[in-house]
Image (spheres, helix red, strand yellow):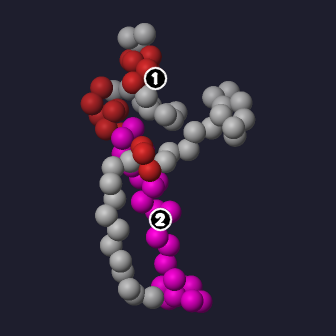
Amino acid sequence: MTNASFLDYRMPTCLDLPMIDAVIVEVPNPGHPYGVRGVGEVPIIPPPAAIANAIYDAIGVRMTELPMSPDRLLKAMGKI
């Protein structure tokens, strides 16, 4: 078991991601009764997956757990 409880589970935060420039789109959402759109949920999801794919493309090691720390990367490569 990777995480014994939710207390040990580490969620990605803004410190794990590059700066994201928000673009304000002032077009109402026809699928919502008030016409609102989401703002911060979507940009936080793709970067960790992109980083994991970049690691795999570079050295052929799959990083399936967070955090993708140097220690875990070296261990996955068999260097530790």
* 55 sits left or right of 2 in the view: left
Q: Measured from the top left, where is residue 3 in percent x and y?
A: 66, 31
- Foreground tag (1 vs 2): 2
Check residue 72 in the rendering and tell me which mark sits there, or answer none: 1
Q: Write the residue at 69% across / 38% down.
A: 7
Q: Measured from the top left, where is residue 5 in percent x and y?
A: 72, 35
Q: Nearer the viewer, residue 18 or 45?
A: 18
- Mark 2 crowdedness (10 Å alpha carbons): few <14, some 14-19, many ≥20: few
Rendered image quadrant of residue 70: top left
Q: Is residue 26 magenta?
A: no
Rendered view: 68 above or below 46: above
- Given the image, on which type of amino acid does mark 2 rest? Gly
- Given the image, on which type of amino acid does mark 1 rest? Arg
Residue carrying label 2? 40
Q: Write the residue at 52% across / 88% down.
A: 35
Q: Is residue 38 magenta?
A: yes
